[in-house]
Image (cartoon, grey):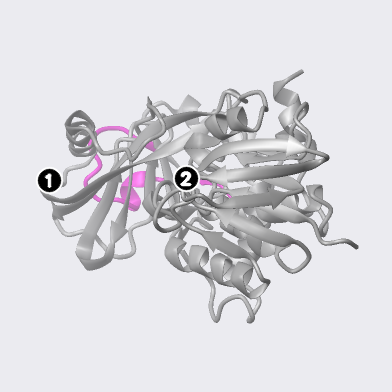
Amino acid sequence: MTRRRVAIVGAGMAGASLAAELAATDDVTLLEAEAHPGFHATGRSAAFWSETYGGPLVQPLTTASGPFLHAPPPDFAPQGFLRTRGELLLARDPAVLEAMAADFAATGVPIAWRDPHGVVAGLRGDWHALWSPGCADIDVGALHAAYLARARRGGATLLCDARLIGAQRTEGRWSLTTAAGDTIVADVVVNAAGAWADAVAALLGAAPQGIRPYRRTMLQVRVDPPVPADLPLILDAAGGFYFKPEAGGRLWLSPHDETPDRAHDVAPEEIDVALAIDRFESAIDWRVEAVERRWAGLRSFAPDRLPVYGFDAQAPGVFWCAGQGGFGIQTAPAAARLCAALLGIGDVPQGVDATVYSPHRLSE
């Protein structure tokens, strides 16, 4: 087959993983607006793999990604990227958990009722819980680096400080211009620009998909009593908070905020830091002694909160790989394989229905 020229806009996890899938068969150029890839959502992930996260329509991508993340091929990485931790889903109202259990009943994801007070000492008041044993920490940095390395081995070119500022399509090909003065010719342009996806679409003459960024706040805190190293991920199923242990007895804590924002280098707001601490100390009899780090990232969602994978319905040569919300890291292996298959390379992962994520659904 004739090698295509593929330009991927965005070298975060979405762009890097797809570049790694395509580079052996296509001439791939990654365009990264920042000085180094993974600066925004990828570098600010909460770093866990959970088959319940994102809901039952995202779960097939997460599940299909699990085997690769647990045991990647030796030529990709010398060891896996996951460390199993388990997940405790809390709710004061058992109906919240009953609805969740019903949603996942047919998926094969292991979920069982559990007494939360027997797992986490110090919970305040009446809580109910579901236990999902497969939840794991992800080494996000190592995974992203491995994808970039595979892309480079396949011949892909990474251009940093290369924000897309212009695009023109003539005679079936794209001519792209970057802020650094580069000109790239491509048969296909992949929009993997995360929070900037709709802005990139406008440059390409494609209709926006309504992908909107939302701010998510994370803290690293020191608590009393010290955090047990074997503590599972604790997540309020009603959306109030989540936390998990970090090295040195610390805790990663989020108020599970989802505040509409704009595409930029987002920073945490003091109100969200205070909200995280208040929700945490209201739920459990542990005291936050110090906030050692704080950061925020942008999670980008389409209106139906599902990712957008596939060729644009109207603009020729434009392919979407965007709208992954907060689950883009944990679904990256399957999502990259799915997108590669839609671009004509390889097969759709088993158990994944490509039509669920098609951009055509948003224009119908």
Under circle 1, the secondary element is: strand
Q: Which residue is mark 1?
A: 287
Residue at 57% of width from left, 58% of height from top? 16
Q: Is residue 236 left or right of residue 11?
A: left
Between marks 1 and 2, how big is the CA–CA gap?
A: 48 Å
Residue at 53% in and 78% down = 79
Asked whether residue 282 is drawn in magenta, I would say no
Q: Which residue does the numbered mark 2 point to in the structure image?
A: 179
Query: Which residue is depicted at the point 62% across and 25% down?
Result: 209
Q: Which residue is nearer to you in this view: 145 or 128?
A: 145
Can residue 192 be seen at all in this image of the molecule?
no
In the rendering, at what x and y percent does residue 122 appear?
A: 21, 46
**Numbered circle sitting on residue 159:** none
* Count of residue discs: 2
Who is closer to the viewer here, 362 or 175?
A: 175
In terms of secondary structure, what is the magenta stretch mainly? loop
Query: 164 left or right of 348?
Result: left
Residue 98 location, x and y as percent? 54, 31
Q: Is residue 90 above or below residue 8?
A: above
Residue 295 lies in quadrant:
top left
- First to last magenta residue range: 110-128
Instruction: Judge whether residue 133 can be spotted in this image.
Output: yes
Give the quadrant of the N terminus.
Answer: bottom right
Q: Give the residue type that dot 1 points to.
A: Arg
Q: Is residue 81 above or below residue 36?
A: below
Going by the numbered disc 2, the residue's amino acid type is Ala
Element type where label 2 sits in the image: loop
